Amino acid sequence: MFIYFVRKLNLFVVTFLLLTFVSFNIARLTPQGPWSDLSLFQGWITYLTDLFSLNFGVTRFGAPILDELIRYFPATLELCILAFMLALLVGVPIGTLAGIKRGKWMDNMITTVTLLGFSIPVFWLAILLMMLFSLHFTWFPVSGRHSLLYQLDYVTGFGLIDIFLMDRTYRQEALLEVLSHLVLPVLTLALSPLTEVVRLTRSSVAEVMTHNYVRFAPTKGLSMFTILHRHVLQNALPPIIPKLGLQLSTMFTMTFVVEYIFNWPGIGRWLLEAVTDKDYMAIQAGVICIATLVLSANILSDLLGAMLNPLVRKEWNAVK
């Protein structure tokens, strides 16, 4: 386990240095950049020093970039976490059902619906949900994080957490208001990872169901629930955990579109505005933060999948 951790740590360090080099060259595009008059190597070292001290500089309008990141990044994290949790809670049971019923009509129906969901463009789905549930039925708000009727002070930046830190007078009403603003962006963002979770779970469960220890488990008098919990899911889910970490990369890419359409005050919309304003300092700071988060999530998912996978533990014991 230690050797595997060291390998992943080395991969993280090398990839992170490459990301900082790309981000540094983005910052050198502006003549007003603090490293524009330095050589490439010397400027990169200076940039790394400032980066580790959380000195991202200032935006084109003079605002500290670190304050901007602290303000906008939690909104994106809140959106992605809720969407990813929804994809897991819905996708794992549906994928398990499809894997158990492999080759039958239910499996074919789930596979067809999953393929259609994967093929839907994110921007088209966001506009469709907005027109249907916001403009036609008026069930959910069109955009934003909360209504202007409630004064919500963002302490942590996460709306659902800051609700419980506000005055109790309108806490319940404000909570319902924040949840209503989250519904459509979360549903839009969760569709693509949901389809991948269903596909991966179906494939892994279908493979485990062909093993002899699962096929002969009913002869022991075990119920179907016990077989699924003890034999199927415990062996089918660990191999797909590293693959689920890759969905965060796709999710952060789609966040740019979702935040722009729903006017969500997150890092994606902030970066798009920085690109429009040609604010290279803000662009390089946003790029390095998102890339570091995605890289960390992928490394952690690999480590978690390796810790929970019995086959990997068997390889470690064999090496020892």
Image (cartoon, rainbow, N blue to C red):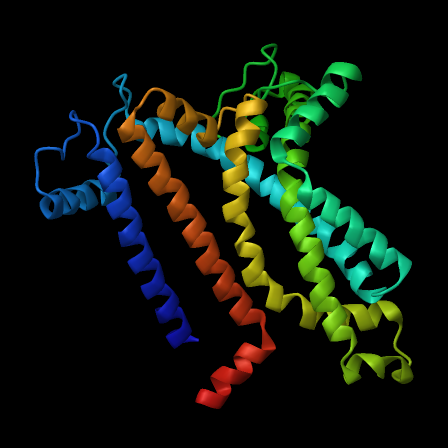
Quadrant (top left, top right, bottom left, bottom right) of the C terminus: bottom left
Could you say where residue 55 lies in the image, as x and y percent from the top left?
23, 35
Estimate the x, y position of residue 12 in percent, counting from the top left.
35, 59
Query: Along the line of sight, which residue is nearer the eye, 122 or 317?
Result: 122
- In this orientation, which residue lies closer to the viewer: 209 or 118? 118
Query: Residue at horizontal 28%, vertical 23%?
Result: 59
Q: Is residue 221 above or below residue 80?
A: below
The residue depicted at 67 percent of the width and 21 percent of the height is 177
Quarter residue 63 falls in: top left
Picture residue at 31% right of the left edge, 23% below the top: 278
Residue 74, visible in the rendered structure: yes
In this orientation, does residue 158 appear?
no
For this rendering, which residue is in front, 6 or 123?
123
In the rendered image, the vertical position of residue 167 relative to residue 234, given as above or below? above
Instruction: Indicate left or right for 17 with 82 as reference.
Output: left
Tell me where residue 166 appears, x and y as whole percent: 55, 23
- Residue 317's place in the image compared with 36, above or below, is below
Give how far across and how far down residue 144 sits, in percent.
58, 19
Residue for point 65% across, 34% down: 188
